[in-house]
Amino acid sequence: MEICGKTLYVSDLDGTLLNRKERLSSFTAETLNGLIRAGMLFTYATARSLSSASIVTKGLQVDFPVIVYNGAFIRSAATGKVLSSQAFSEKEQDLLFGLLEENGVFPFAYKFLDGREQVHWMRECENEGSLRYLASRKNDPRMGEVLSLEKLRQGDVFYFTCIGEREELLPVYARKDEFPFARFIFQQEIYRPEYWLEIMPAQATKAHGVERLKKLLGCSRVVAFGDAVNDIPLFQAADEGYAVENAAPQLKEIATGIIPSNEEDGVARWLIRHSGFSPL
C-alpha cells in the first residue's frame, strides 16, 4: 500500500469520537465516511477490544488497521487479523496476578486460551462497576466467568482491567514502579463514579501503536484526537494533537489546540475544516 507523504488521522473513541451514548452521531459517521472515500487516511486508537469497538463504530467504513487495547494490538478492522501485538511472559503475568491477589483485587483477565480470545472474571467477586461493565457486554462471546483463581490465571494474559473504588485500587497502582515490564493506567470512568485500573505490557501504548502503524502505512505525519490521560502518549507521538472540550486538563495542557466536545462532533467538524478533504 503506497501512501507515502500523507497524513494519518487517529482518534480515540470514548469521550472523543463517541457521544455520551457511546455511539457515533449520524453526522460524524456520514462525515468520516465521506472523508475516507475522498482519500483521507483515518483510523482509531482505543482501550476497547476490536469486538467492542466494532459495535460502537457500526457504520464507520474504516479501511485501515486499528489500534486496540491501548496499543497492545494493531488489527485489521475488516478481518480481525493481528498485525502487531504485545504480550506478558508467563512469569510477568504470574507476578501481576500475585500483586492483585495480595490486594484483594479480582480483575477482568484478557487472554488467549485454546486458540480463542477470551475475557475471564471471578464469579461472586463482582462490584457495582464490574456488573455494569458486564451488562454492557451481554452478547460478547469472549466473556466467561470462572470459579477459581487457578482458572482465572489460565491462558496467555495480555491485559488486565480492574474496576472498583479509588481506595481499593490505589494500593495496586502505588506499586507500579516495582513492575517495569508493565504499564498502569489509573483513572475515573468517564461518566461514572468508579475507577478503572488497566495493566498492559510496557510497550502497549497508543504512541507505540501509532508509530508502528505509521511505518506500516508509510505515512509521514500523524494528527491525533483525544480526551483522557491515556491519550497523552498518543499526543506526544503525533505531529499535532487536538483535545476535545470535555478532555482531561492534563491532556489539554499538551494539546496543539482545543476543539468542540464529543457531543458537538468536534473531531468531524475539525476534519472538514482542516484536513483538506471534502466529505461531499
Image (cartoon, rainbow, N blue to C red):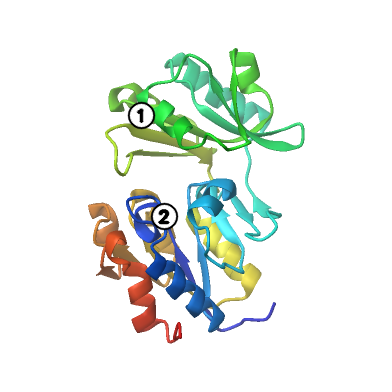
Describe the element under mark 2 as helix, strand or loop: loop
Single out the mark in the foreground, 2 or 1: 2
The residue sitting at 27% across, 69% down in the picture is 259
Is any atom of residue 59 visible in this view?
yes
> Is the residue 214 above or below the residue 17 in the image?
below
Give the total number of marks visible in the rendering. Answer: 2
Query: Can you give x and y, in whole percent of width and height, for residue 241 in the image?
Result: 36, 67
Residue type, numbered disc 2: Arg
Residue for badge 1: 174
Query: Is 225 situated left or right of 86 in this image?
Result: left
Q: Which mark is residue 23?
A: 2
Query: Can you give x and y, in whole percent of width and height, for residue 1 in the image?
Result: 70, 77
> Callout 1 environment at 10 Å: few (<14), some (14 to 19), or many (20+)?
few
Describe the element under mark 1 as helix, strand or loop: loop
> Is the residue 152 above or below the residue 279 in the image?
above
> Is the residue 267 above or below the residue 182 in the image?
below
Query: Can you give x and y, in whole percent of width and height, for residue 261 in the image?
Result: 27, 62
Residue at the extreme right of the image, as rendered: 114
Image quadrant of residue 12? Answer: bottom left
Residue type, numbered disc 1: Ala
> Callout 2 environment at 10 Å: few (<14), some (14 to 19), or many (20+)?
some
Query: Is 82 situated left or right of 201 in this image?
Result: right
Q: Earlier in the sequence, mark 2 or mark 1?
A: 2
The residue sitting at 62% across, 35% down in the picture is 142
> Is the residue 222 above or below the residue 209 in the image?
below
* Residue nearest the viewer, comparing 166 with 277: 277
* Residue nearest the viewer, comparing 146 with 92: 146
